[in-house]
Image: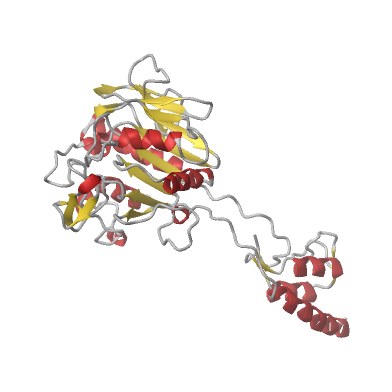
Amino acid sequence: MKPYRTFATVFVLGLAHLFVGSSTALAAPGVTPNKVLFDATKAEMAANADWVLDTDVNNIGTGTGGAMIPGGGTESNPQRIPTPAASGITATTAETYWKGALSSWGVALVKRGFSVETLPLGGRITYGDATNAQDLSNYGIYVMCEPNILLSAAEKNAIVRFVAAGGGLFLIGDHNASDRNSDGFDSVDVINDLASSNGVATNPFGIVSNVNQFSLTSTFVATSTTDPLIRGAAGTVTAMMYSAGATLTISGTNAKGAIWRTSARANGDVMVAYSTYGLGKVVMCGDSSPFDDGTGDTNDTLFTGWAGEVNGDHAKLAINGCLWLNPVPPPPPACDADVNGDRLVNGSDLAMVLQSWGPCAGCAADVNNDNSVDGADLAVVLQAWGTCP
């Protein structure tokens, strides 16, 4: 067999050279689990809002048409990467490690193995744009807490496609007439505009915001023992407190209520809802106050919704929501030609085939499982040369 192997080696290496030089198709954009992006491009810091993860500078002001202007005021101007570094967070780190109304949320996520970033003022909301370092494909969850500037047509399309591809969207609104930056639109308008006009589908998530406001504490939570938001790994949620929030309306077969305003549990009177769309998931809440940790911009009216209300249930809800939203990577497709299991078909696999040539019941190099390593197995390896899909 040795002379034959020598001939086979020369023959195969020549063919392999041709395969290595062949081009491969570009992969479609996907999503990246365990990475959370908090939006700060839509006036989330305007007026009495401070829906940011962390800020080192407070110099934002409101300009003409509601634009956020650096150097024009004293509102939070959050940077992309929170500081100090997330690597310094331990199980006992206080949420004051970062400064922002959503810092508790961010610190809690890091403690559970997530990485978190801010999409800062001037950042671009895109999906599938390789020129954008913060393209949504680089994240698994996108959080928008009380956005106050309407999304562009391209931004709405990107968000819906991100969810359809497996991303998670955590969308938080507020009561009607809560226009923080005086541009004529509030978070209710932003949410409903995303649902009604996105270039993909009308109301793709089956959830819209009502134009109203309520302040109350509700204990009318979903009763299913498997509800992901109410009975998740972060704990059981028994109540939610609204401090001037808008209710939601759910429709279709995918959208479900998690918390309702009244015991009637009507589809048009939901406080927290969730849904699936394509490969992805959405969580929506009609009030931002439950996520305020009370340690944001000291010039604002702060709430202690995160841990100081309803026995900390708001924090449990937020983390349960993220755990459910986080994309689960699908198992890699079978790659029989990858003899050594490194997800690459290359010279190492070729060598294993040649070294095992002949009868070989149950060996890894018998890629077609016919109890013999021969030309058929060789052909499979050559045809699959390169990175496994």
Q: Residue at x 77, y 64 (%)?
A: 363
How many numbered markers are drawn?
A: 0
Judge by depth and name the residue closer to the eye, 348 or 57: 57
Determine which quarter of the picture holds residue 146.
top left
* Residue 374 shows in this picture: no
> From the image, which quarter does the C terminus lie in?
bottom right
Q: Residue at x 24, y 30 (%)?
A: 177
* Residue 188 shows in this picture: yes
Q: Position of residue 385 (x, y in %)?
A: 71, 69
Left or right for 252, reference 368: left
Q: Position of residue 106 (x, y in %)?
A: 30, 49
Task: Residue at the far left: name it.
Answer: 299
Left or right for 297, reference 165: left
Determine which quarter of the picture holds residue 195.
top left
Q: How is the image coloured?
A: secondary structure
Q: Residue at x 50, y 36 (%)?
A: 276
> From the image, which quarter does the N terminus lie in?
bottom right
Please tell me whether residue 309 is drawn above or below residue 43 in the rendered image. above
Please tell me whether residue 218 is drawn above or below residue 143 in the rendered image. above
Q: Residue at x 48, y 34 (%)?
A: 205
Left or right for 254, reference 214: right
Please tell me whether residue 148 is drawn above or below residue 71 in the rendered image. above
Q: Position of residue 311 (x, y in %)?
A: 25, 31
